[in-house]
Image: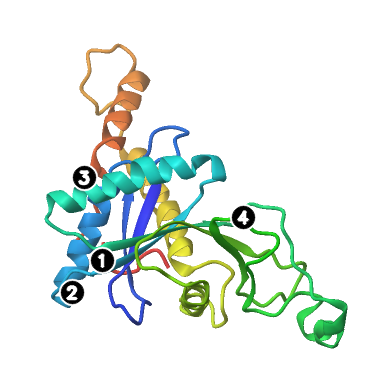
């Protein structure tokens, strides 16, 4: 199950619409990524009277070995879909990674702040030298307060940039967005669109399991002698139907996943 969320009230960027879609088994590529994004752009246009001219995409859940898939398949699918709709915004694509082993610690000269941060670096700490890629655009950002345990920085890797972001401007944008997460009064450790997409995908899985559970295994019309086989076949066909995950119009463009 995958989810794509998009802001609908820029520059405040605290309201999101979400779309949930099914995925192939053990496949990281988001199916119909371009169509899903175009639907969210249409939602933005209905609410604001114009399409966004600039789009920043935060992609979660991929490792370095899958960067080429994101660039060569998902991004190209998005661009082709926008071109068919005669829509050509500028796009920046950033991968946000939390599954890594890098940790940051304050220097001995900063020991006076240890009691407040429990030995962690202060929120807003950025590392964009020495331990990063030698020539690609990436950095580590600790945006949250480390009140317990050791803070884990988020690794942001810019794969595509048509906005010519400087390091400072992009880091400031991401850090400011970390203050807008609706469940927390402090900055969070990961940029909120990624958090919201995770929440929406989890809710989508719950909806799917509930709808499948409501279907009687004996209700499917099939020539098979096994009721279980007919039920599985019906569930599989439904999982490939985009309308199967369509939410009510009063619900799909609000933050139902919070």
Q: Which residue is mark 4?
A: 133
Q: Which mark is residue 229?
A: none
Q: CA distance from mark 3 to mark 2?
A: 23 Å
Against 212, residue 160 (above or below) is: below
In front: 33, or 231?
Answer: 33
Label 4 close to label 2 by CB (< 8 Å): no
Q: Nearer the viewer, mark 4 or mark 2?
A: 4
Q: Dot 1: few (<14), some (14–19), or many (≥20) neighbours within 10 Å? A: many
Q: CA distance from mark 4 to mark 2?
A: 40 Å
Q: Is residue 22 visible?
A: no
Q: Residue furthest front?
A: 135
Q: CA distance from mark 2 to mark 1?
A: 10 Å
Q: Earlier in the sequence, mark 2 or mark 1?
A: 2
Label 3 close to label 4 by CB (< 8 Å): no
Q: Which residue is mark 3?
A: 243
Residue 73 in the image: x percent, y percent? Answer: 35, 40
Against 99, residue 172 (above or below) is: below
Q: Which residue is mark 2?
A: 47
Residue 118 in the image: x percent, y percent? Answer: 80, 78
Q: Dot 4: few (<14), some (14–19), or many (≥20) neighbours within 10 Å? A: few
Q: Nearer the viewer, mark 1 or mark 4?
A: 4
Q: Is residue 233 visible?
A: yes
Q: Nearer the viewer, mark 2 or mark 1?
A: 2
Q: CA distance from mark 1 to mark 4?
A: 38 Å
Q: Which residue is mark 1?
A: 253
Q: Earlier in the sequence, mark 3 or mark 1?
A: 3
In front: 217, or 4?
Answer: 4
Q: Earlier in the sequence, mark 1 or mark 4?
A: 4
Label 2 close to label 1 by CB (< 8 Å): yes
């Amino acid at each position: 199950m995958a989810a794509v969320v998009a802001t609908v009230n820029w520059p405040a960027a605290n309201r999101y619409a979400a779309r949930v879609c099914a995925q192939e088994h053990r496949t990281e590529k988001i199916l119909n990524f371009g169509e899903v994004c175009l639907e969210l752009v249409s939602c933005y246009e209905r609410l604001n009277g114009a399409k966004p001219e600039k789009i920043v995409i935060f992609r979660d859940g991929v490792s370095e070995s899958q960067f080429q898939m994101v660039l060569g398949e998902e991004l190209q699918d998005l661009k082709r879909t926008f071109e068919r709709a005669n829509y050509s915004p500028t796009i920046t694509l950033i991968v946000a990674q939390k599954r890594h082993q890098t940790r940051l610690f304050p220097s001995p000269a900063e020991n006076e702040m240890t009691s407040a941060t429990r030995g962690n670096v202060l929120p807003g700490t950025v590392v964009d030298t020495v331990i990063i890629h030698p020539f690609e655009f990436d950095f580590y950002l600790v945006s949250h307060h480390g009140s317990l345990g050791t803070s884990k920085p988020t690794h942001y890797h810019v794969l595509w940039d048509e906005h010519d972001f400087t390091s400072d401007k992009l880091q400031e944008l991401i850090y400011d967005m970390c203050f807008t997460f609706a469940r927390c009064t402090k900055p969070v450790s990961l940029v909120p669109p990624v958090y919201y997409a995770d929440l929406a995908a989890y809710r989508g899985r719950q909806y799917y399991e509930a709808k499948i559970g409501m279907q009687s295994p004996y209700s499917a019309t099939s020539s098979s002698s096994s009721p279980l086989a007919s039920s599985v076949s019906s569930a599989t066909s439904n999982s490939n139907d985009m309308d199967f995950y369509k939410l009510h119009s009063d619900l799909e463009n609000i933050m139902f996943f919070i």
